Image (tube, grey):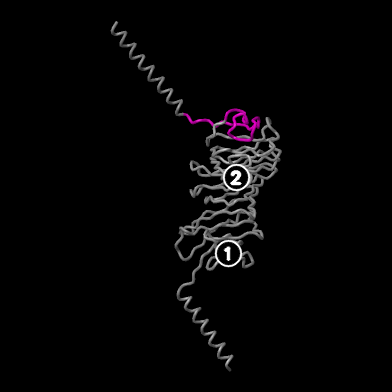
């Protein structure tokens, strides 16, 4: 009897251990991304209203939001996030043929902006033909999640996708990828300092837009590269606070592989305000700093003391000769 009881106890312990191990294994599995489709069935346009979605949404960086799916082909007025939100990817579906707008604000018409923290990016289906805008009104921030290295704008639709709010990364150097055949437009003052890779399609930087470049020692900086098209019509904002040298060269735009254009409203300026002068011929200057649109390179060249002394002496000599000729 005792022997049988002992065997039963060992068997029960083994079973309990097996069940516990299985349970822990289930909890250790990665959470699968959930998709929530906007239906607009609520009484307002808020993301926080559950009846506006196909099911009650959980706003996490692993979940995706779908707009323009077959369940709701006409969305009307822009939706608004209502509060700071975290998401994986925004998807404009195959039936997103009407213009869709998203406000990064607390109310439908208010001026209080909020952060939309994004881990995946934005995707536009190839069958979508509408012009879509994230950050209607320019309020709030499209913030790249600290838990990801980059976000991707995969746009294959025939309309334009505009990000009208600031794109930020909390100065963490997160990258931004543009893929797909569609046209992506940036129209805000962006502060992310990671690389921008335009692999395909077009990126338009409007005359109200800014891109920030962090200049560091050893000719290191973020850059714009890829094989697509980039139309520069805004400002390149230069942050040289981490650079203490007297010379350098930073390739900000890889014009060798990109199809890059620089419009009449293109310009450069430092963080503390000084702007570059358009010297003509694709050359922009600010003191000893020069940007060449033909090479996409920013250079700093400070004359050596001996050179400065020579030039000063030459100026004095020239002035002396001129005065003597005038007296003669």
Q: Residue at x 46, y 58 (%)?
A: 242
Among the two numbered marks 1 and 2 on one chain, the one whose residue lies closer to the N terminus: 2
Q: Return the residue nearer the eye: 322 or 114.
A: 114
Q: Quadrant of the N terminus?
A: top left
- The residue at which mark 1 appears reads as 276
Disc 1: CA contacts within 10 A as few (<14), some (14-19) or many (>=20): some
Q: Which image quarter holds the C terminus? A: bottom right
User: Where does the image place residue 239, in percent across and percent down from the top left?
Assistant: 51, 57
Tell me where residue 7 appears, x and y as whole percent: 32, 11
Q: Residue at x 49, y 48 (%)?
A: 170
Q: Is residue 10 left or right of residue 81?
A: left
In terms of image quadrants, where is residue 111?
top right
Residue range of the region highlighted in magenta in the rendering: 29-56
Which residue is under mark 2? Answer: 111
Query: Circle 2 — which element?
Result: loop
Please say if 15 is above or below 51: above
Q: Is residue 245 magenta?
A: no
Q: Residues within 10 Å of mark 2 (few under 14, many from 20)?
A: some
Q: CA distance from mark 1 to mark 2?
A: 33 Å
């Amino acid at each position: 009897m005792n022997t049988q009881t002992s065997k039963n106890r060992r068997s029960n312990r083994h079973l309990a251990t097996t069940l516990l191990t299985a349970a822990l294994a289930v909890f250790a599995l990665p959470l699968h991304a959930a998709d929530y489709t906007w239906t607009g069935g609520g009484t307002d346009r808020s993301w926080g209203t559950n009846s506006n979605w196909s099911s009650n949404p959980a706003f996490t960086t692993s979940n995706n939001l779908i707009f323009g799916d077959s369940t709701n082909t006409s969305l009307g007025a822009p939706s608004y996030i209502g509060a700071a939100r975290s998401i994986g990817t925004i998807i404009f579906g195959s039936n997103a043929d009407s213009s869709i707008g998203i406000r990064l604000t607390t109310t439908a018409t208010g001026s209080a902006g909020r952060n939309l923290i994004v881990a995946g990016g934005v995707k536009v289906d190839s069958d979508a033909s509408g012009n879509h805008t994230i950050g209607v009104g320019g309020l709030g921030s499209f913030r790249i999640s600290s838990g990801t290295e980059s976000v991707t704008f995969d746009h294959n639709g025939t309309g334009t996708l505009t990000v009208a709010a600031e794109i930020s990364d909390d100065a963490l150097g997160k990258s931004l990828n543009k893929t797909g055949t569609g046209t992506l437009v940036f129209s805000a003052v962006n502060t992310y300092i990671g690389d921008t890779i335009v692999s395909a399609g077009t990126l338009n930087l409007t005359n109200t837009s800014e891109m920030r470049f962090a200049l560091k020692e050893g000719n290191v900086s973020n850059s714009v590269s890829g094989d697509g098209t980039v139309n520069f019509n805004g400002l390149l904002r230069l942050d040289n606070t981490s650079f203490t040298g007297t010379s350098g060269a930073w390739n900000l735009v890889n014009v060798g592989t990109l199809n890059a254009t620089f419009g009449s409203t293109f310009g450069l300026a430092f963080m503390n305000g000084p702007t570059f002068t358009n010297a003509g011929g694709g050359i922009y200057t600010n003191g000893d700093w020069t940007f060449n649109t033909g090479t996409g390179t920013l250079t700093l060249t400070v004359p050596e003391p001996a050179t400065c002394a020579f030039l000063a002496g030459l100026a004095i000599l020239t002035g002396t000769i001129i005065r003597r000729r005038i007296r003669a």
